[in-house]
Amino acid sequence: MAGSFNRYARSILNAIAQSVFCDRPLAGLLVLAGFASVSPIAAAGALIGAIAGTLLAEFLRNWSRAEIEAGMAGVNLAILGAFLGLSVGGTAWHPMLAVLAVAACLAIEQALRRLLDPLNFPILSLPAVLSVLAIITAVGSTGASFWPERLALLSDGIGLAPAIALFAAAMATKSIRATAMTGALTAFAAVSSGVLLGTGAVGPPSLWAFTVAPVAFGLHAVFLAGSRLGAFASIAGALATSGIWAVWTLSPLGAAVPALLLPFIFGTWLVLAVVRRRTGSLVLDPPIWATVEAIRKSRAARRPVVILTGAGTSTGSGIPDYLSGAWLDKDIPASTYSYERFLDSARCRRLYWEACDKFRKVADKAIPNRGHWALAALERNGWLSATITQNVDRLHQQAGASEVIELHGQINRVRCLSCSETGAWPPSGAWRKFDLCCGSCGGHLKPAVITMGENIPPAAWDRSLLAAKDCGVMLVIGSQIAVSSAAELVAKARDYGARIVFINLGAKAHGYLPGDLYLEHRFEEAMPAIARLLDCPPERKEAHKDPAASEAGEVARDAPPAAEEDVTSVAY
């Protein structure tokens, strides 16, 4: 019971905090105090609205659990409640207005979510603002006033000083850097508008407090996740919203319809539309923001970020999943390709070599995709400590990654099963004529990839376990975690307190738990967005192939023939 109460209390305070783009209960308390400094009734209205929005979302189930806990379900009703609280004392105020406004806000919110969510565009405070404007228009048609006269005392901004200080403190809980930039842009807007409009030391609060401040902070701290791109967008947003405010307020439109928060909303959308056109829509995706925030927190805590990649990272480079069956003879049981059968049967060795040769030829022509370049850029800039990969195509290394742990080996090399010596591939088709053996010890040669029933090399496994124990965030990309070794690494990282982030298109991974982040995106689309928001956009360079990938092997030495199944053996 106490746990449920605490969860609801956090969700309600987060809903209030979201009115200034924050998501912490402490920020909610500071914002509530800010409202109270202007009007205790406004603070009460914000609290009632946040409670109503949160409880209704639980009852109607029209928001996800994560969205409710983050405060998204209650923020618009909290803003609406603050507006309605400010209006108490107006000549036309009536409790029925509040009921109608809440119903309108909920209806508008659902309609906007259906319209804008597929576009990754935020609805912001538009439902609350449109609801208030509808009531203002209705009340104004009767000749009455929605706003009480006492609010005129706030028109010079002096009465807002305590609220501004408390709101700034709330914003600092989210991002000190974004708060500082917002303060600078807001101060500039206040002073410059005061000079241009001749209103004294500062211009109208409707410009600098309710237009410039929210757009600057929202773009920098939330929508572009504290990146340099977000800083530039904040400046662009301040300019764009100031222009919209000026056109709206100083034209006949302003006399007909009060601007409220509309310049901020339209200016934010304008900047986000430009950003989306230039960088792609995924930089506006909330799970991408959450992933970036988790990575930043991990580095701040001096815990590295580790990547675990599977076949889904290579499909964008034209390499089908190794387990898809594309490389195997469909008329032959999969068990034929097992490690045990490779050791026991020359026919199975030939079949295994054929399958690997098909895979090698495709991998040899493949080049890294945008996701590989992004991972390499993140490593170069110190965001990643290691990439653990189940892939054998070496595309990570071709993109420039250096700290790569290959769990399953590499397809462009061969390895002796007796002495573990590695070398280049044999001449094409040699395995069809001879049982390939090591020139040093006579042991069987095998493509240097792990097959069913074969153990992962101990050195690679030990490095992977150490990386999993040390990391603060593990990004599991392009893998369903169907292999026990990958599942064990994820479990190990989780046991040591790491945040697990899955990036994969399709069904959720086997190891997914409710506390994990899940990004249902393609690797080659999600990783460039993450890299850009971490200020290291990938720069594609010419991929370099391992010379061993295309070299023919040395000509075989003499060795005794093998008696099994009439296959002649040659030392290679």
Image (cartoon, rainbow, N blue to C red):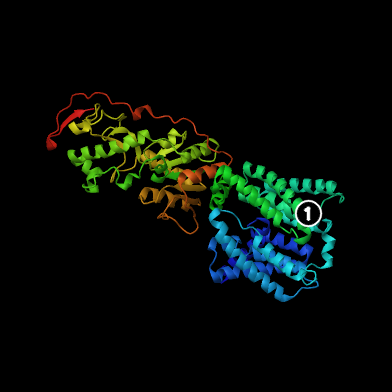
Question: Which residue extends farthest front?
Answer: 252
> Would residue 303 be visible to someone looking at this image?
no
Q: Which amino acid does label 1 sit on?
A: Ser
Q: Mark 1: which secondary structure?
A: loop
The residue that appears at 56% across and 43% down in the rendered structure is 279
Residue corresponding to mark 1: 251
Q: Quadrant of the C terminus?
A: top left
Q: Where residue 166 appears, x then y in whole percent?
A: 74, 57
> Would residue 309 be visible to someone looking at this image?
yes
The residue that appears at 40% across and 46% down in the rendered structure is 312
Observer-nearest of 264 and 63: 264
Q: How crowded is mark 1: few (under 14 residues within 10 Å), some or many (20 or more)?
A: few
The residue that appears at 72% across and 69% down in the rendered structure is 135
Q: Is residue 444 left or right of residue 57?
A: left
Q: Is residue 232 left or right of residue 552?
A: right
Q: Is residue 330 left or right of residue 126?
A: left
Q: Is residue 303 above or below residue 130?
A: above
Q: Is residue 32 above or below residue 251?
A: below
The residue that appears at 68% across and 67% down in the rendered structure is 47
Q: In this view, does 377 lie above or below 117?
A: above
Q: Where residue 123 appears, x then y in whole percent?
A: 62, 58
Q: Where residue 539 appears, x then y in whole percent?
A: 52, 34
Q: Quadrant of the N terminus?
A: bottom right
Q: How many labels does the image show?
A: 1
Observer-nearest of 59 and 390: 59
Q: Where residue 426 appears, x then y in whole percent?
A: 26, 29
